[in-house]
Amino acid sequence: MAIDRIIRVDMTTGDVTEAAASEAYARLGGRALTSRMLLEETDARIHPLSEAAKLFIAPGLLAGTAVTTSGRTSFGFKSPLTGGTKEANVGGQLGHRLARLGIKAIVVSGASPDGGKRLDIDGKGVRLSSADDLAGRSNYDLHRELVGEALRTRAAATIGPAGEHRMSSASVAVTDPEGRPTRHAARGGPGAVMGAKGLKAIVVDDAEGVRTVPGENAKEFKGEVVKFSKMVLDDPRVHNTSRYGTAGVIKFVNRENVLSMPTRNHRKGSWEEAHSISGQVIEELGKERGGKMLPCMAGCIIKCAILYNDEHGEHVTTALEFETIALLGSNLEIGPADAVAELDRLCDDIGLDTIEVGNAIGVAMEAGVLEWGDWEGTKRLLDVDIREGTALGRIIGGGTAHVAATYGIDRVPVVKGQGLPAWEPRTLKGMGITYCSSPQGADHTAGMVTARGATPDTLVKQSRQEQLTMMAVDSVGVCQFTNALPGDMAAFISERFGEPVSEDELLEASRAAIETEREFNRRAGFDREDDRLPQWLRDEALPHPDGPSVFDIEDALIDEVWA
């Protein structure tokens, strides 16, 4: 089956057109496709929220197939947060639904001149219509109405109030298998771009689509699916993730020889109350309250999503992940798990990147806007100020660097304008190399390098290899927690399309895609000085058993990642 439909939506005129993908795009999907289209179709110097900007949405090359976790979707755009290229990657039900209707990409251009719109896609066609009745509404409410009882065939991608306010930390919420808006394309501000277009919601119904996209070499493809699934299920790393979710790492990263639990705006790498927000405590609460581990999309065998209930057994969130727990928890000195879970639900409902807003509030606390540990004040910032778009809410929602500039804070945890993830670059120096050298800015999923004790040269090589692998992962559309290797993905592509692709060819394609992103950034005005961590991470040491630890990888070595 060919997945080659490119849907173009002009929000200014209301025109919706469709064409088959060109041969140049035939073997591009997900992040590789959105980054290529962004470079080819937009001027890198435009304002990211202008009418001239575009939003690109694309499932991966394996979307719609039986490959576990293969339904991830890429949102590509010029970021209002970084001013450069951006891809926000999301699970949920959207990717598979698009692929089963043969859709390779959606391109949204222009800006609505007469109020918000919704885009409906199904077997009958594509329709753009008024969304006046959806204006101002939050994500949980939206998904109940837009998906509702049609959960088995329908998925939505929506923006909450933060997106309508065009806040740079705004996310796009995607329906999970339970019909809730707990999966988010979050990093870099895709919700703001969608809001600037005047597009409130995309609703996709694949009732008339195929059930499963087959491989061109059907028998061989099925064999690869079975082999890959067994590999995933036999992986001890997956066992831990399936039991605790990503929260399972908290016990490890909070240790004094790791120090990757950001506390007080990254001033410390551990928190004495970390156990109260750990995966082990969350697991015990789940047993008492009817919680469980769920897949973030149909067909996922890992099931890392934590269904978190309150003390009455009522649902709070299904996305209580390590990054969220660290940035909204220890970084703000807020706990226990119930408190962080409620903040996470608010972010899902309003439509916010939890990493960015956690960093932004941390800087605000450093500026004295709130006291450390002020849970009620943090709730008010989210549920009143950001939701309603007050002046303070717009400052916080504008992102970490915006808060720091407003309050005169010089200790700003960002790279290329994007807030740091939880993984500490002063102790896990390979992560610092990735944050610097990735075209995406401070992004842990661009290339995880958590080795300790390796030489700087080795860390540079590992970062390069992991970034190439993650480009492939994001482009075929599988989850990083499968721990898929380039050889696995090359085998899938070969049997899916009936043309042999080697591991080396796949990595060459990944390098070309990353160079596409780097070229966009160059055109946008970035240079080597943007591939740097903030100076305070080189000057301000974390106490460590092996001696005070700073980020001390030489700039010249960082420049060698893509030399």
Image (spheres, rainbow, N blue to C red):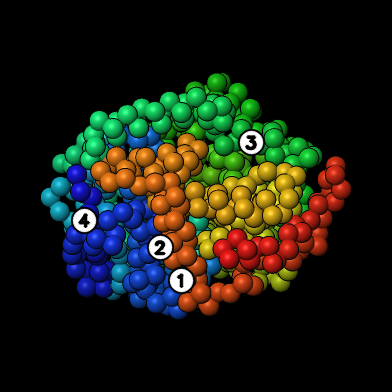
Give residue 241's position: percent from left, percent from top: 54, 31
Amino acid type assigned to the residue bearing label 1 in the image: Phe
Query: Image quarter for residue 175?
Result: top left
Say which of marks 3 and 1 sits in front.
Answer: 1
Q: Name the residue under label 4.
A: 5
Question: Are dots 2 and 4 in contact, CB under 8 Å?
Answer: no
Give the CA separation, mark 1 to mark 2. Answer: 9 Å
Q: Mark 3 points at which residue?
A: 249
Label 1: element kind: helix
Q: How crowded is mark 3: few (under 14 residues within 10 Å), some or many (20 or more)?
A: some
Give residue 267's position: percent from left, percent from top: 77, 53
Q: Nearer the viewer, residue 127 or 435?
A: 435
Q: Counting residues from the N terminus, which is met first, the one under dot 3 or under dot 1? A: 3
Q: Name the residue under label 2.
A: 35
Say which of marks 4 and 3 sits in front.
Answer: 4
Give residue 75's position: percent from left, percent from top: 39, 57
Question: Are dots 1 and 2 in contact, CB under 8 Å?
Answer: yes
Q: Nearer the viewer, residue 357 or 430?
A: 430
Give the CA separation, mark 2 to mark 4. Answer: 18 Å
Q: Counting residues from the N terminus, which is met first, the one under dot 1 or under dot 2? A: 2
Question: Are dots 4 and 1 in contact, CB under 8 Å?
Answer: no
Could you tell me if residue 324 is visible in this image? yes
Give the CA separation, mark 4 to mark 1. Answer: 25 Å
Q: Counting residues from the N terminus, which is met first, the one under dot 2 or under dot 4? A: 4
Q: Nearer the viewer, residue 50 or 211?
A: 211
Query: Image quarter for residue 216?
Result: top left
Residue 476 marker: none
**Residue pictured at 21% horizontal, 56% vertical:** 5
Quarter of the C terminus within the rendering: bottom right
Label 4: element kind: strand
Label 3: element kind: helix
